[in-house]
Image (spheres, rainbow, N blue to C red):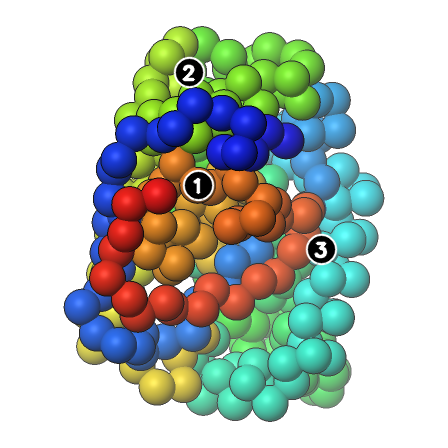
């Protein structure tokens, strides 16, 4: 992965602030989907039409690692999760793509089975709510859609992002555009009467949108999303709490 240290100086594009507050009301957890069929083939799958195709869902490994990661996260954060779960304040928000929807469903099933193993409970009675959120969709890689060797394509795009977060070459959705839509979602959640103390939102999405959302929480330019020193890459099926950095937005 390329870093800003080996690239030309990026354009000065300030981060889009999430809030004017010193803290956010709810807890936000970013979750990257498990290994998918496209990623196992090193194939770009970023358009909505291809993304919702069931054939582009999770691999068997992706399903297994999603269950295992959910169990590990529950074990590490049991009090937070159980309180939100029991109070019906645990909400799973998923990208509309099949690989994220499958991941979200596995996460919900695992949480329900962990906290309510009683077989007498009606199936799904305590299953966490899942909502589809278009703003969590994969970044659109334009004319790269369907191409193989994604491991070579993505670094080229990220290098351009680091120089200019408004880059849209080959029809690629700019990093800044992604930052705008994911931060808009967080603002909406904060403004809703339901967002408040004790609410936990699990954001099941994709690598680039999650990294770019991390730049917003850190109040840095979207250009920095590909720099592992500032935003570590999301592993498949990784759970990561977003921490709000309440400082004035600064140029990268």
Camera-side residue of 99 and 35 = 35
Q: Please state which of the two labelled residues, at mark 3 or mark 2, is closer to the viewer.
A: 2
Q: Position of residue 38 (x, y in %)?
A: 66, 26
Tell me which numbered mark, 3 or 2, is placed earlier along the sequence. Answer: 3
The quadrant of the rendering that contains the C terminus is top left
Tell me which numbered mark, 1 or 3, is placed earlier along the sequence. Answer: 3
Position of residue 50 relative to residue 25, above or below, is: above
Q: Please state which of the two labelled residues, at mark 1 or mark 3, is closer to the viewer.
A: 1
Judged left or right of residue 26, residue 96 is: right
Residue 173 appears in the picture as rendered: no
- Tell me the crowding category of disc 2: few under 14, some 14 to 19, or many 20 or more residues within 10 angstroms, Cα based: some
- Tell me the crowding category of disc 1: few under 14, some 14 to 19, or many 20 or more residues within 10 angstroms, Cα based: many
Q: Which residue is mark 1?
A: 224
Judged left or right of residue 47, residue 31 is: right
Q: Position of residue 40 (x, y in %)?
A: 75, 29
- Tell me which corner region of the image, top left, top right, bottom left or bottom right, holds residue 100: top right
Q: Which residue is mark 2?
A: 142
Q: Position of residue 223 (x, y in %)?
A: 39, 36
Q: Position of residue 89 (x, y in %)?
A: 42, 80
- Tell me the crowding category of disc 3: few under 14, some 14 to 19, or many 20 or more residues within 10 angstroms, Cα based: many
SS type, badge 1: helix
Camera-side residue of 27 and 94 = 27
Camera-side residue of 198 and 129 = 198
Q: Which residue is mark 3?
A: 66
């Amino acid at each position: 992965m390329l870093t800003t240290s080996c690239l030309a100086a990026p354009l000065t594009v300030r981060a889009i602030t999430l809030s004017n507050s010193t803290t956010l009301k709810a807890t936000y957890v970013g979750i990257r989907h498990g290994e998918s069929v496209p990623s196992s083939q090193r194939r770009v799958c970023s358009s909505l039409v291809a993304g919702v195709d069931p054939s582009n869902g999770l691999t068997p490994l992706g399903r297994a690692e999603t269950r295992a990661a959910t169990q590990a996260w529950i074990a590490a954060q049991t009090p937070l999760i159980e309180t939100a779960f029991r109070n019906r304040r645990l909400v799973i928000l998923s990208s509309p793509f099949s690989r994220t929807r499958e991941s979200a469903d596995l996460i919900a099933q695992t949480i329900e089975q962990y906290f309510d193993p009683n077989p007498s409970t009606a199936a799904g009675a305590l299953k966490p709510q899942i909502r589809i959120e278009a703003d969590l969709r994969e970044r659109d890689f334009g004319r790269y859609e369907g191409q193989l060797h994604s491991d070579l394509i993505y670094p080229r795009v990220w290098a351009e992002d680091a120089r200019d977060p408004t880059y849209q070459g080959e029809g690629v959705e700019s990093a800044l555009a992604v930052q705008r839509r994911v931060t808009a979602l967080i603002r909406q959640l904060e403004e809703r009467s339901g967002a408040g103390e004790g609410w936990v939102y699990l954001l099941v999405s994709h690598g680039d949108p999650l990294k770019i959302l991390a730049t917003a929480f850190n109040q840095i330019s979207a250009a920095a999303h590909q720099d592992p020193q500032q935003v570590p890459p999301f592993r498949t099926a990784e759970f990561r709490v977003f921490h709000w950095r309440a400082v004035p937005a600064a140029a990268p």
